[in-house]
Amino acid sequence: MTGRNGAARPLIVELVGPAGVGKSALAERLRARPDVVRASVWNLPAALLIESAVRSLPLLLRLCVVTRALPREELKQIVRLNALRLFIGRRVAGAAVVVLDEGPVFALSWLRVFGHPRLQNGRAEPWWLATYGVWAALLDRVVLLDAPEPVLTSRIRGRHKPADVFRHMTDGEIRDLVARYRVSFERVLDGLARAGGPPPVTLATTATTPVRLGDAVLELLAEPSHV
């Protein structure tokens, strides 16, 4: 497999979807193949995070000036996002596919959901457009996973994930946060598409297994891109 436009590099695909949709199980299924590498904005090598922080410092300072107050968590998310780009550029040699589970679409959607209001206004728009452009050029496929809200809520209630933001939420609060993420996914995917990124392919995860879903995703990845 090669990147879009025949580029001699791994195929970069991001799995996108709300909590409980099955991204992690699918990513693990795909990673079972010897030619697949799994990555995300979490648990990146410390050396890359430090390098990203140093490289991102001028940008972070500009964003702080533009927004007049950009809290620590937003800055950390931007550093992780830039570190993921370094990881893709340096640490995936020999892979045919790089599966991003909570990659750029997730990170940018997180910033839309939880980010400081001033990060959403027009003064920060140049950063959003530039970031969309960077990731639109890197992403070859986006697979949007979905399931009905009752299924998502049931799965979220049954999982055991450390520091789970949903743990102490009511069902109504979970539905509200899932809805906010859906809106943010749409907005980010639209931004990527406008920058030349791949259109998402939607797959339902309700009436299938990770094995069958993994096979379906591999079939999608084998198809030539039309972007």
Image (cartoon, rainbow, N blue to C red):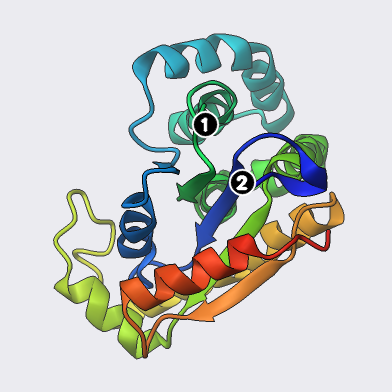
Q: Residues within 10 Å of mark 1 (few under 14, many from 20)?
A: many
Residue at (74, 41) in percent of width and height:
128
Q: Which tag is nearer the camera, tag 1 or tag 2? A: 2
Q: Quadrant of the C terminus?
A: bottom right
Pinpoint residue 58: horizontal percent, then vertical percent. 68, 12
Q: Is residue 123 left or right of residue 203?
A: right
Pinpoint residue 161: horizontal percent, then vertical percent. 19, 56
Quadrant position of residue 182: bottom right
Pinpoint residue 60: horizontal percent, then vertical percent. 62, 21
In the foreground, 38 or 49: 38
Residue, disc 1: 84
Q: Label 1 sits on what residue type?
A: Leu
Residue at (46, 29) in percent of width and height:
76
Sequence order check, earlier mark of 1 and 2? 2
Residue at (81, 42) in percent of width and height:
129
Quadrant position of residue 187: bottom right
Residue, disc 2: 11
Above-or-below relation of 190 to 75: below
Residue at (60, 61) in percent of width and height:
221
Q: Is residue 176 left or right of residue 181?
A: left
Q: Label 2 sits on what residue type?
A: Leu
In the foreground, 7 or 90: 7
